[in-house]
Every structure is written in C-alpha cells, then in structure tokens.
Amino acid sequence: MSDQSLERIRRAQQGDTSALSSLLREHYTFLFKYLIKVTMDPLLAEDLVQDTMVRCMEKINTYNGTSSFSSWLITIATRIFIDRKRRWKREAEWKQREQQEQGIRSIRWRFESRGEEWSEVLDSLSKLPSAQRVAVLLKHYYGYSYDEIGEILRVPSGTVKSRVSLGLNQLRKELNEDGEG
Amino acid sequence: MNELQDVPLWLWFCIAIALMLQGTLLFRDARRRGRKAWFWGLWAITTVPSPALVYLLVVILPERRRRKKM
Amino acid sequence: MEKDKDKEPELYLHKLSDELDRLDAQYNDITPPSLQELERLMVDASVHRKSMERKELLLFWGISLILISVFLSILGSAPMIYWIIQAIIPIAGLSALGIARIRRNREGAQE
C-alpha cells in the first residue's frame, strides 16, 4: 500500500470525510466488479456496493492494516451479501430464481449488445450455489489462501476447500457436458 | 434469605439505578463495537457486576491486545 | 494421457480467469459516483443510523424498566430462582453462539 493511501486512511479514521470519500471512490470500480462476479446481478451489485461503502464508513476505525484495504472491502462486501442471501432464503424460491435469471440476462445482454460472444463458463458459474461461487472466485481469481477465505467467510478453511472443489467439479461437469453434447 | 424482605425501598431504588446504568453503558458500548448489544445490555440490567466484568474480559481486553499487535 | 489429465485443471482455471477478465472488461466504462454523491450518501446513512439508534435505545430502556422490576421482585421474594436464572444466562449465550457457528458451517457445506 502506498504511503499516500495509508495517509488517506489515517485521515479518514480521524473523521476526515473527504479523505474517506476519495478513498472509497478510488475502490468503487474494483468493488463493483467483484460484486458483479459474486452476485451475477448488476442491480444487486450496485446496491451492495453502496451498502458496503456505508458499512465501511461506520467501521473505518476498526480497519487495522493487517490486510490490504481492498481485502477489507471484499470482506465487508461478502459478509453483507451472505447476510442478504440468508434473509432472502425466507422469501419464495421462485422469486429468488426469477431475480437471479434477470441478473444473468442483464449481464448476457451487455455482452451481446457489444458484439461479444456470451460465455458458457460464466453461465455455469452463475448456476453455482453462491457459497461455492464465492469460494471459487476468492481462491482462483483473487488468489486468496484457504485460510484467508475462511477468515473472510468465518468458516473453517476445510469448509472453504470443499466448497471450492465442489464448485470446480460442477463447473467442469457442465463444461464437459456442453463439449460432448 | 428472609432478610431480603427487610431491605429498605431506597436501596432497591439505588440497585435499580445501578443496573440501568450498567445496562445502558454495556448496550451502547457493545453497539459501538458491533457486538451483540441486546444480549449484553439485557444481561447487564439483571445483575451487577458480573456482566460488566465478563464484558471487560471477553470484549475489551481482546480488542486492546489486538490493537497493540498493530 | 496422464499428463493431459494433470494439465486439465490448470487449463480450465486459466479459461475461468480469462472469462472472468472478459466479464470485468464489460464493465470498464462504469464511472464511480462523484465525491459529493459519496459524501451525501454517507451523511444520509449517518443521520439515518443515529435516529435508528436513538429509537433502539429508547426501546431498550423501556424493556429494561420492565425487566428490572420483574427481576428485583424475584430477587426479593424468591432469591433462588433469581440465581438460577443468573447462571442460565451465560450458558444460553454461549450455546447460541455455538449453534450459530454450526449453522454457518452447514450452510455452505450442504450446497
């Protein structure tokens, strides 16, 4: 982390709201892209980025520099997403599925409206249970260790390991089916 | 045990105030730290001083130690 | 043939990363909100949170007054029950913690 960022974080922690705003603005795109991958739903991602920024502001004083600022944001965002998912579980399943399909359709539309081919891999990724998708993303795209992911999700690293392998197996299975079929 | 019934009213009143103070303190502090405020607050209004002592041990000391590590 | 099978996971992960990069690229033209918008967002959130906290504190006080009167009368008339309840509270708290942790593990593992 650059000295400039550290200085800005320190000022933000002391109550400098413009330092905090500029800090959050700098990380906005990164956070948004992370949430798009996690949720596979741009509207939800936008919503969650805002919630994450608010929570980050509330807890800025608990940031202790043991991990990078982006990792800290990822932790907050992921936990907010998990809580949101848990609350949704109580709602009708068909409603959830419809929302998920809408999200994926919106992403797919974005690809196709720019003349880009849609991706079977992304399609399969979106069909994974969110717990597995998050684990796979954090491990194999963002490069966190099983222990680090365990800390983010507040589960044992063994659980993370099994989620990752289940997720990858499912993805590979779908890809092979498509290849053969 | 029967002596409890002879305890004067003003003493009960003081105890009630002490409990309210402990409860409010723990509730607000736990809320500020993002820990289970309702649990600590409600426990703290039922008796004194055990919840406050336990809170010190379980919440404040570990966080102090973690800060020092930084 | 065995070497192919060994390479397979790596190739696949490589493909996964590539596709995720493509997904990222689709959203490269997203502009973050302006500094004023962010500050506004935070001020609004802060104001909202403070008013919720005030209401919550009032609710807590209301419940506290009721509970205190209940508990003090129990203490006055049947102290044994009072001490039993006192012992139960931390045990209940710890078990609730344990249950929450177990549930969190199960949530992901089942999926």
Image (cartoon, helix red, strand yellow):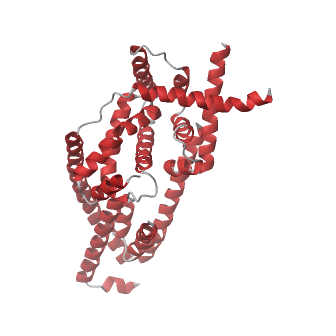
- What is the x, y in percent for residue C94? 50, 62
Measured from the top left, where is residue C90 in percent x and y? 47, 67
Which of the pair A159/C40 is nearer the observer? C40
The answer to whether C69 appears left or right of B36 in the picture is left
Residue at x-position 52% and y-position 41%: A138
Instruction: Please identify the residue farthest to the front as the structure is shown.
Output: A3
Residue under the point 23% across and 38% down: C34
Residue at point 36%, 69% (across, down):
B44
**A1 w.r.t. C94: above or below:** above
Question: Residue C58, image x and y in percent?
Answer: 23, 58
- Say whether residue C26 is visible: yes
Nearest the viewer among A68 and A104 is: A68
Q: Is residue A66 above or below residue A103?
A: below
In the figure, is residue A64 to the left or right of A151?
Answer: left
- Please state, as top left, top right, bottom left or bottom right, where the C terminus of chain A lies in the image: top right
Q: Quadrant of residue B47?
A: bottom left
* Visible residue check, residue C103: no
Residue B6 in the image: above or below residue A174: below
The image quarter in which residue B26 lies = bottom left
Residue at 49 percent across and 17 percent down: it is A118
Q: Residue C2 placed where, x, y %?
A: 79, 30
